[in-house]
Amino acid sequence: MIFASCNESSFLDNPPQGTVSEELLMTPEGSDQLCTAAYAALMGPNPQDWSVWWYPVTHWSTGSVRADDAYKGGGGTGDGWETHRLETFTLDATDPVSDSKWYHLCVSIQRCNSALRVLNICTVEQVPLRDCRIAEMKVLRAHYFFELQRMFNLIPWFDEKMDDRTVETTPNNVYSREELLDLIAGEIRAAIEYLPETQPEVGRVNVYMAKAYLAKVLLYRAYEQNPETHAVVKIDEPSLREVVSLCREIRNSSRYDLFDDFQDLDLVANDNGKECIWDIQYSMNDGSGSAGRINWSHLLNTPQGPYGGDGFFIPSQDLINAYQTDADGLPEFGYQSLPDFAKVTINGDASVISNYDHNVDPRLDFVIGRPNVTWKTYGETPCLAQWVRDRGTYGYNCSKRFVVSPESPDMYPGWPWGASALNWHMIRYANILLWEAEAHIELGEIAEGVKLINQVRSRAASSRYVKAWTDPSKCNGGTCPDFDGYAANYKIGLYPESLSQNAARKAVRTENRLEFAMEGERFFDLVRWGIAADVMNKFIEREKATRVYYQGVSFTEGKDEYLPITNNQYKFSGKNYVQNPGYGEF
């Protein structure tokens, strides 16, 4: 379509893929086609053709590999070298990942603008759902702008009222970070009154999705940053108060709840279920080519073994260690002073596991595939070290999330490896609980916050624990620990409501990591809390002993919190853009 199609040279160049008349666009069908194009960008515009696996909407690289949760993985440091540069903080203005991610998000924003241009000049008689569709497009546009801002910091603001030339030359330093987040929040607030509680088509934005997203934006807005150093200089109380109000509205709606079992998150049958506030919709065998409209962002990340995958996105040893718990089942906050939990060594072809007696949070084995431990419901063999492609570089563990079990009829056979119709849970009910908990704690309302944290921990405690593998002959000659029939010494407890504010703050931040591990949010959390440099440099210092490629690596405060504005975008703007702090001039 004229307004929605883009080529690789510029997101402003929109050559027609087929002529669509103005008369047709001014109809419910025509305007809905433009809206559908904006929704389609949630999975990445043209995801298969544009290699969205390197620029994922799930942020596995930009949000988890860039943090302390994961290693790049794959066939070595040169395999996907652009993501290796993300992991080692060696980016500059020539970076192709940064350039493509910026471009993809601008295309997505322009799809919303194209729909809004048409909807704004239609009447309700022409498009009966006009006001609702405008609201949907504003929320989608707010999402794409939010993604652009939290990745790149300094960004231009452009809407449907601006012509191409104005968009092209708009500087990226007109608004501060806080002003941009205010604009984004304003978009969503303006949309909320026109959105229904339910939509007839699954995936369309409803009022609760909008309120949840507004809560997320405001939680970021609450942590005001120094524009040069990115240090947090103030906590904005009104933003936190609004977060609490929005999250309570969602909780009090009685529409959402936690799944009974954490592992239900990775079942296709539970797509759009009670925990799912905003799912990115995927489908399989839908006539669209290949496996269908699947999650191409995670194409590279299935392990070898029964999937035959590319083996990117490997959980870090630090993340594994962080799941250790004390005698009360609470996190071992000093875990970095302890030996590596479940350390794997190879003896011939056998995986030998040592130091595996410590108490651990059961989510460890919901999230991470450890050698010699049962893998989902797969009955032929446990997870094996050989499922990782480059074990010498990245260790022996796999990510267990975001794929169905290999024997499941929901999995597509062959290429693309591990594909299914499994949705991506962009916002789930657990987010709402922990966002509200965080706001309460920063406001000094400790007991209220701790109660919400404990709801999340209670679900983990009541989930079905991973069973021990029972046939040592299939453990590749290694050890198969059996703790009363379970794969580890699982112990998880609840926090007392009498915590100090500092202890409660540590609790909610740790809970965010453990509950949402590998979901692409960790790095952005560290940045908004203002602790990215401290956490990452401690992580890198310890990793140097076993990850040779971390030698000489460090996180530079006041620079590495955000991606660089690239040379290509600087030139495209007519040299009207400025560079983020720390990267030097163009």
Image (cartoon, grey):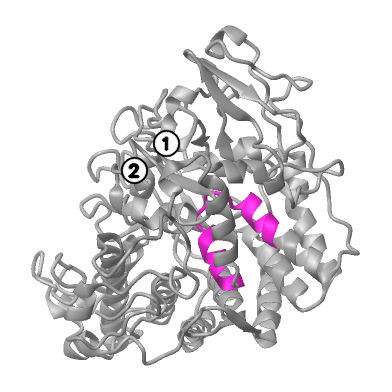
What residue is shown at x 74% (from left), y 46% (from top)?
Answer: 459
Extreme-right residue of the structure: 498
Q: Is residue 112 above or below residue 509?
A: below
Residue extending furthest top? Answer: 473
Find out whether residue 511 is within the magenta segment: yes
Please state, as top left, top right, bottom left or bottom right, where the C terminus lies in the image: bottom left
Mark 1 residue type: Thr
Residue at the image position 83 percent from the left and 46 percent from the top: 493
> Could you tell me if the residues under marks 1 and 2 are in contact, i.e. CB atoms within 8 Å?
yes
For disc 2, the marked residue is 77
Q: Quadrant of residue 367?
A: top right
Among the 4 quarters of the image, the one containing residue 2? bottom left
Q: Is residue 543 left or right of residue 139?
A: right
Which of the marked residues, 1 or 2, is nearer the chain's N terminus?
2
Residue 427 appears anywhere in the view: no
CA gap, disc 1 and disc 2: 8 Å
Left or right of residue 85: residue 314 = right
Q: Amino acid at mark 2?
A: Thr
The x, y position of residue 526, in whole percent, is 57, 65
- Where's residue 259, x and y in %? 66, 47
Q: Position of residue 5 (x, y in %)?
A: 18, 68
Residue 273, horizontal then vertical, whole percent: 58, 50
Q: Which residues are drawn in magenta? A: 509-529
Which residue is depicted at the point 84% across and 55% down?
495
Asked if residue 332 can be seen in this view, the reply is: yes
Q: Nearer the viewer, residue 160 or 479?
A: 479
Residue beneath disc 1? 393
In the rendered image, residue 537 lying in the magenta stretch gets the answer no
Name the one closer to the observer, 323 or 226. 226
Nearer the observer, 235 or 46: 235
Q: Residues within 10 Å of mark 1 (few under 14, many from 20)?
A: some
Up-down relation of residue 70 to residue 395 (above or below): below
